Amino acid sequence: MEEIAKQTGLSKVSTHKSKNQIFELLKSIKRNKRACIGLVIVAAVILIALLAPIISPCDPYKQDLNIRLAEIGTKGHILGTDEYGRDMLSRLIYGTRLSLLVGFFSVVFGLAFGVILGLLSGYYSALDTLIMRVVDVLLAFPGVLLALAIVSALGPGLVNVIIAIGIWSIPTVARVVRSTVLYIKELDYVTAAKSIGESDSYILFKEILPNCTSSVIVYATMRLATAILSASTLSFLGLGAQPPLSEWGAMAATGRNYIYQAPHLTLLPGFAIILVVYAFNSLGDGLRDALDPNLKNAI
Amino acid sequence: MNALLEVNDLKTYFYTADGIIPAVDGVSFKIDRGETLGIVGESGSGKSVTARSIMRLVPNPPGKIINGSILFKGENILTKKEKQMRMIRGNKIAMIFQDPMTSLNPLFTVGNQIVEAIIIHQHVSKREAIERAVEMLKLVGIPSPEKRIKDYPHQMSGGMRQRVMIAMALCCQPDLLIADEPTTALDVTIQAQILELISDIKEKFNMSVMMITHDLGVVANIADRIIVMYAGKMMEYGDVEDIFANPLHPYTKGLMESIPRISSNEKRLKSIQGTLPDLTQDFKGCRFAPRCSCAKDICHNEEPPLVQNGSRIVRCFQYLSGGDEKYGKSS
């Protein structure tokens, strides 16, 4: 008996498979130049965020009023300083942390609720109408406006921004998941699972959900870009990160007052946002090409 | 002896935007222990819906079983709760599907899927379940099952996947196996192997089999009795030898004549003229009448009853006793 269990070792199989899959995925991303660039930038940004205390030259919150608004290239402050003499490079590096954090948690928040709602409404037609009408109401608000309204209601602050952007992501995630579920639940292997007596919850979470992951991953990557952008927008409007936090949107907002004397205060955080958003978008595109079986066959 | 499965006047209707479709309209039959029942008919005749009604897997909405009873071992399946139904599915009644390419989940190994099927119904450890799965794969004739159990469905051929499906269906030793066109998606040599496998296993476990197919060759080999279905109605029901030797219903005759023969010199294959009627329309008379070569006036106006003819049942006015006057002289 042990022999067979050893030989078959089902648990080992799955890790072996996922390694293979990741390898396959990387290979197909490698073929796609844009996705490749995206992946490199995303990896770099994540690395920068993780290593922020080590690589940043100064304390991002240390003020030095003797060198306020220093230009790019100043000695000791490669990217200059802001209106309180804080090192711009360090502030940008620490800003990566906040942006990624807000992006990640708001997407996770949106996914958690969106996936469950999508699964339920796709699988149980009785719940479908109810959930989808609620989703319709949420979708009727123009994007940032909804987040804006929620943050105004909850009060400014990063946590509230995460909640707001998360809620704003729910309807779209729910839609994406629902459409995949509608397709998958009609497939034979789901009927086959029913015919061997599987329970609904098993079918939903073990048969259908894993088959939704590719579309969810693609959507989540793209959504990260939007989430980071909207978080910066909200911070720019003064509803997100509060001073002195070094958040890109907030930095751009305060820098605006000095745009004639020291344009880099606004431009640098702006570039950082553009770069990260672009990177996540291209990576998302690449992932979609790699994970979508229809496109794969077409190529 | 009590029949294993007894279906009485089963009616499963689909409520669609275009109207009500009586996919299964008053079908009755029974399956004894160890018996193989073949259900034949063309696409859309209600064969699969009959099978899925027995499993209670008709998608609802739009489908609904509106009448009849299905007695399995004397208990009515239709009044059971969903939870009780789950104890029956896979455990007592198992099903294999038409397309082995889509009936296995592409994301899990076949071993994983068989093990899962075993664990739901039997209180065994995972290790024992794996052992059982290997045994089952060996039973259905998959070489080196210890290795194959780690394969994903895409690493197997259609015939192998169908064997895996059969292994999955059999792992709890069900009393009744419903095979919904199990060989349609396979090529002819594999077809023969799978059919042989099913009848072997049937003998071994003393199972009953309900074989749904549109291929008369399949039922001729494997079935004890057959039902010929047309547009949701049972047209003929009897022993397989009788029906093949002497088909009574004009539709059955037509089906038999459309089997191509290797000895025949004819250039064109024979077929039955016309197509299935639109079931959403109210229908008067025999559903086959518009395509029937011996249809008389009455056939278009009145629905023929099921007529007992010896050991067989046939739905045609020709065989109604004293029906000759009504029907007119049969040609």
Image (spheres, coloured by chain):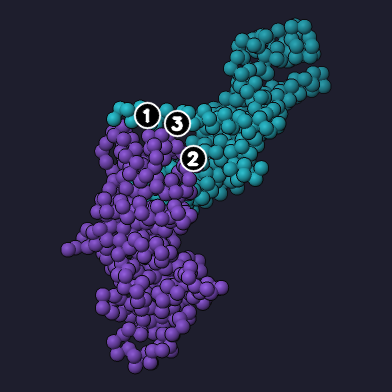
Chain colours: A cyan, B purple
Q: The residue marked by circle 1 belongs to what chain? A: A
Q: Which residue is mark 2?
A: B155
Report the front residue among B260 and B179. Answer: B260
Q: Amino acid at mark 1?
A: Gln
Is B100 situated above or below A16?
Answer: below
Say which residue label 1 marks. A7
Report the side of B59 relative to A66 (left or right): left
N-terminal-most mark, 3 or 1: 1
Same chain assignment for discs 1 and 2: no
**For the point 17% across and 63% down, which residue is it?**
B1
- Callout 2: SS: helix
The residue at 69%/22% (across/down) is: A251
Inter-mark Cα distance, 1 to 2: 19 Å
Residue A295 appears at what percent x and percent y?
A: 63, 43
Any part of residue B28 in sight: no
Q: Nearer the viewer, mark 2 or mark 3?
A: 2
Quarter location, residue A95: top right
Query: At 53% across and 48% down in the image, what residue appears?
Result: A179
Residue under label 3: A14
- Looking at the rendered structure, the kind of residue marked 3 is Ser
Residue A33 in the image, given as x and y percentages of width and height: 71, 31
Other-residue count near label 2 (Cα within 10 Å), few / some / many at <14 / 14–19 / ≥20: some
